[in-house]
């Protein structure tokens, strides 16, 4: 009787989830309601949270609510504070959710919604949430130390350094790819460009307000900023139509690229209170608000999925990104399924604020489930729009041309019927001159969100507003990430050079700061420029590199977790981390290998370089290059990308090897060898 | 009836405080009252920072000098 009472409701949740998934997976010929997808996802999350995370908490970690956490032992009212579970959940979620879960699923939609959905669900339950949860646990048991320190302590100094270098490379690629998304969204869009640029004076105003006028009144200053932002969106439409200001805010990709590089440089050496902190308020609150709004929108509107469950592009011939379902789907959707970057957050501020060990399950595992839900909503948004429009927006200009007529012809030829009128109409609806070849995910998501939200509020007349609202919301937190990331990167460089030249470490000194910032901006700026000028749209090259690096970091973090489980002599449960580690290693290594060596120039960097190199030797110029210089530039870029992919492969292999060695050593040891902080060591206070 | 509306108001108060605290912590601002109470209790000899100093301290800790917590996710 007890068992029925205890598990009965959960069995019902499971049955509902299974039924919803069955409907989603088997419905043919008729559009599925998006609500079934949401219901299926939520049921999977509930069951996974109730059973699998409990299993991990009780059996693998043996969480002990009586054991004092770092927040309790080191309580200083500042960095270490025992914090309410729900409050900390919000903090953790806001830190892990960014552009990743919004963009990856949109790109993956080219294979249909089903492959992406299944990977998001399976990935989060067995890999992503497991990683976040266990890293949080490992860090929490070690005074909230960072991932790099944990790897150094548990695996050794060399793996620690390797992981640091890996993190640095990921930052560079991440910043480049994020900046590229903004460039793609704003190219030739005066409305979008105006509103995004308006955020700079708005943030400066807010910065001065909260520095000198009313310090600490975050709510107040955020409301002022929000109202000004909305005004910027509303008047952005008039600016775009204006005969003088419209063209003044219309920029090419290359111009925007240089502006972003300049912005990244200046913003990251300004004092934090002036631009970064106020922008952070706006982007964080807008992000949370928009996510809630989108969830309500989907629930109220209950749109139908227009995209087929599976498209023919699972064979790797899709226009959005190249490569077959395995391994590239698992690389394309990183955040939302499993994201290595979260290991940095789970070993950052969160473990220092946990009040009780028991909270780690809700915050670590639950927080990641929440992010996965955001990814599912992004997938839904991309799939409720006309597939013809989707492929028009996401195919490279080299394939679809630049006019509605060429695009309609090309996309129809791909198998998704669309008329030039539909394309022009879609652009007009969202207040843009064109939507053709706006790769990068953000514009597609914005169209999907505008479609959903305008069905609930405002109708078609408000569609352009909602579109630019969505663009602004993404651009805003991407720019915050660019600013904060460049800063973090600069500190890393200063630390590294500081090893050789100690005076370089001083982060308040001007010369080292400017030098390190310039180095960092040059690094991501190089990849950004390469992406912006890439005829295949850049996303095609940079997103897989980002995905590989992110999944690679996840493999590294999960290797650490595996080693710790072995060191705790609980190897019978090590499958919990070994299985996802293996899967991620298989995916990253296969994808990395194919990106380097594939004979298909659409996938392999080297064969692409060969093709251009051969033509160059014969004195020929291949489109889109227009000069010999551009030809050699393409060859050079390809080789750089190949080297980078090679570095990532080397990194994974090295860490996996060190991990296996450490695990074997721990297995042979006759006792517990994990280096946890002694729970009894409460500092005298 | 009166007691339950009292109860409801109390709950609403707790809930809205939780939301506000959550929103502030999302941008790196902890609870000043908790901090000040902690310092007064554990270090009676010390004067806690003022609210304004606390605000700036947290701002710097989030993005500031020599610290890598400025990491933002993808």
Image: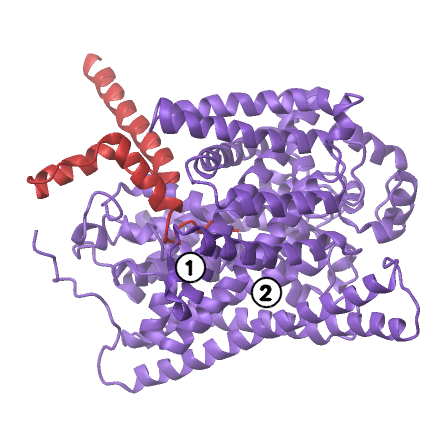
Chain in red on the image = B
Q: Relative to A84, does residue A195 appear above or below in the rendering?
A: above
| Quadrant housing residue A331 | bottom right
Q: Is residue A112 left or right of residue A331?
A: right
Q: SS at mark 1?
A: helix
Question: Reading the chain from its start, which is encountered first: label 2 or label 1?
Answer: 1
Q: A122 or A408, which lies in front? A: A408
Q: How is the image coloured?
A: by chain
Task: Tell me which residue sits at (21%, 54%) in the image.
Answer: A69
Q: Which residue is mark 1?
A: A343
Q: A478 or A128, which lies in front? A: A478
Give me the chain letter of mark 2.
A
Give me the chain letter of mark 1.
A
Where residue A88 sits in the image (x, y, percent)? Answer: 33, 43
Q: Relative to A182, does residue A365 appear above or below in the rendering?
A: below
Q: Which residue is mark 2?
A: A548
Task: Tell me which residue sits at (40%, 52%) in the image.
Answer: A509
Where residue A222 sits in the image (x, y, percent)? Answer: 44, 26
Q: Is residue A408 left or right of residue A219?
A: right
């Amino acid at each position: 009787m007890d068992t029925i009472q205890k598990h009965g409701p959960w069995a019902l949740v499971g049955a509902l989830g299974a039924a919803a998934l069955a409907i989603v997976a088997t419905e043919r010929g008729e559009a599925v309601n998006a609500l079934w997808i949401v219901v299926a996802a939520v049921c999977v999350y509930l069951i996974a949270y109730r059973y699998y995370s409990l299993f991990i908490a009780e059996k693998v970690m043996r969480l002990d609510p009586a054991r004092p956490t770092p927040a309790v032992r080191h309580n200083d009212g500042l960095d270490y504070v025992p914090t309410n579970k729900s409050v900390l959940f919000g903090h953790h979620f806001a830190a892990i959710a960014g552009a990743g879960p919004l963009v990856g699923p949109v790109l993956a939609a080219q294979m249909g919604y089903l492959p992406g959905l299944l990977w998001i669900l399976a990935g989060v339950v067995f890999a992503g949430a497991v990683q976040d949860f266990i890293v949080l646990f490992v860090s929490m048991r070690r005074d909230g130390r960072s991932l790099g320190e944990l790897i150094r302590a548990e695996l050794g100094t060399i793996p620690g350094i390797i992981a640091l270098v890996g993190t640095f490379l990921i930052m560079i690629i991440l910043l480049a790819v994020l900046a590229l998304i903004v460039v793609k969204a704003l190219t030739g869009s005066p409305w979008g460009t105006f509103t995004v640029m308006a955020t700079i004076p708005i943030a400066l105003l807010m910065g001065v307000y909260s520095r000198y006028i009313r310090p600490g009144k975050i709510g107040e200053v955020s409301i002022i900023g929000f109202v000004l932002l909305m005004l910027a969106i509303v008047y952005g439409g008039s600016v775009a139509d204006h005969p003088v200001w419209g063209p003044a805010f219309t920029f090419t990709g290359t111009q925007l690229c240089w502006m972003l590089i300049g912005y990244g440089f200046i913003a990251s050496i300004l004092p934090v209170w002036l631009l970064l902190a106020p922008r952070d308020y706006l982007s964080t609150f807008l992000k949370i608000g928009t996510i809630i709004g989108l969830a309500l929108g989907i629930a109220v509107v209950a749109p139908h999925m227009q995209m087929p469950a599976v498209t023919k592009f699972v064979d790797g011939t899709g226009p959005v990104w190249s490569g077959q379902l395995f391994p590239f789907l698992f690389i394309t959707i990183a955040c939302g399924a499993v994201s290595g970057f979260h290991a940095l957050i789970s070993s950052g501020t969160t473990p220092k604020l946990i009040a009780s060990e028991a909270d780690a399950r809700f915050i670590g595992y639950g927080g990641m489930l929440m992010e996965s839900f955001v990814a599912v909503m992004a997938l839904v948004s991309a799939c409720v729009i006309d597939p013809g429009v989707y492929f028009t927006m996401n195919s490279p200009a080299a394939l679809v041309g630049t006019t509605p007529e060429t695009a309609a012809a090309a996309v129809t030829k791909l198998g998704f019927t669309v008329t030039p009128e539909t394309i022009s109409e879609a652009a007009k609806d969202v207040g843009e001159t064109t939507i053709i070849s706006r790769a990068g995910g953000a514009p597609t998501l914005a169209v999907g969100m505008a479609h959903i939200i305008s069905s609930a509020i405002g109708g078609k007349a408000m569609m352009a507003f909602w579109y630019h609202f969505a663009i602004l919301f993404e651009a805003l937190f991407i720019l915050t990430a660019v600013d904060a990331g460049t800063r973090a990167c600069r500190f890393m460089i200063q630390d590294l050079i500081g090893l050789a030249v100690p005076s370089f470490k001083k982060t308040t000194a001007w010369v080292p700061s400017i030098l390190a910032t310039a180095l960092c901006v040059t690094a991501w700026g190089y990849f950004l420029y390469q992406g912006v000028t890439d005829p295949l749209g850049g996303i095609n090259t940079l997103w897989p590199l980002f995905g590989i690096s992110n999944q690679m970091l996840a493999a590294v973090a999960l290797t650490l977790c595996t080693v710790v489980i072995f060191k705790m002599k609980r190897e019978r449960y090590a499958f919990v981390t070994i299985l996802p580690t293996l899967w991620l290693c298989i995916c990253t290594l296969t994808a990395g290998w194919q990106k380097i060596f594939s004979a298909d120039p659409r996938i392999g960097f080297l064969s692409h370089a060969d093709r251009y190199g051969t033509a160059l030797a014969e004195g020929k110029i291949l489109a889109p290059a227009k000069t010999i210089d551009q030809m050699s530039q393409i060859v050079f870029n390809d080789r750089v990308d190949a080297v980078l992919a090679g570095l990532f492969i080397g990194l994974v292999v090295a860490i996996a090897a060190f991990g296996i060695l450490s695990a074997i050593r721990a297995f042979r040891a006759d006792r517990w060898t994990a280096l946890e902080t002694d729970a009894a060591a409460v500092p005298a206070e | 009836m009166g007691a339950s509306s009292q109860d409801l108001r109390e709950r609403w108060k707790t809930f809205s405080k939780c939301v506000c605290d959550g929103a502030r912590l999302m941008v790196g601002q902890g609870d000043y009252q908790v901090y000040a109470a902690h310092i007064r209790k554990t270090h009676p000899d010390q004067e806690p920072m003022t609210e304004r100093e606390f605000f700036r301290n947290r701002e710097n800790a989030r993005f500031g000098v020599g610290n890598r917590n400025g990491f933002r996710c993808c």
